[in-house]
Image (cartoon, grey):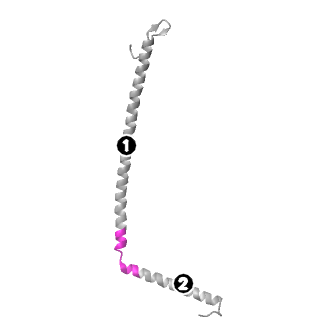
Amino acid sequence: MENTGNFRKALFGFNTKDVMEYIAMLHNEFYAYRQQSEKEIYDLIRKIDEFENTAEKQQETVFGAEHAEILDDLNNADAEKLAMTADRLEGILNKIEELLDKEEEAQNPEIKD
């Protein structure tokens, strides 16, 4: 029998053997196609996972290097500049406290230290 779907005629329709062989052939083709498709899907998912892992590792190394560089810059920062900034902040804090004390004295002139 050919795979064209043309069946031999029988007394009450088509030849049963031809129809059953054709159905079996279609089933086998479908099963083979399904297996091939599932294998391709599995392979593609595996490749996607590999690419994602590679991208994450590259991102970690890039950001890790930048992070380490920033930490090194902070650790190597000039201690004198940090001390000067701390002194300036302390001076500003003292001025704010003085202003608050003056304002409090202005509101309550009878209260003295």
The residue that label 2 is drawn on is: 96
The quadrant of the picture occupied by the C terminus is bottom right
Q: Would residue 58 appear left or right of 87 to someone viewing this image?
A: left
The local secondary structure at tag 1 comes to helix
Judged from this view, the residue extending furthest toward the top is 11
Residue 85 spot, x, y in % from top left: 43, 80
Residue 2 spot, x, y in % from top left: 38, 14
Q: Residue at x 35, y 73 (%)?
A: 75
Q: Please state which of residues 1 and 59 is positioned toward the viewer in this rendering.
A: 1
Predominant SS of the magenta segment: helix
Give the residues in magenta.
Answer: 71-83
Residue 7 spot, x, y in % from top left: 44, 12
Q: Residues within 10 Å of mark 1 (few under 14, many from 20)?
A: few
The residues tagged by marks 2 and 1 sit, at their Cα atoms, a distance apart of: 63 Å
Numbered label attached to residue 46: 1
Q: Residue at x 37, y 72 (%)?
A: 74
Residue type at tag 1? Arg
Going from N to C along the chain, the mark reached first, 2 or 1, is 1
Numbered label attached to residue 100: none
Above or below 59: residue 104: below
Asked if residue 8 can be seen in this view, the reply is: yes
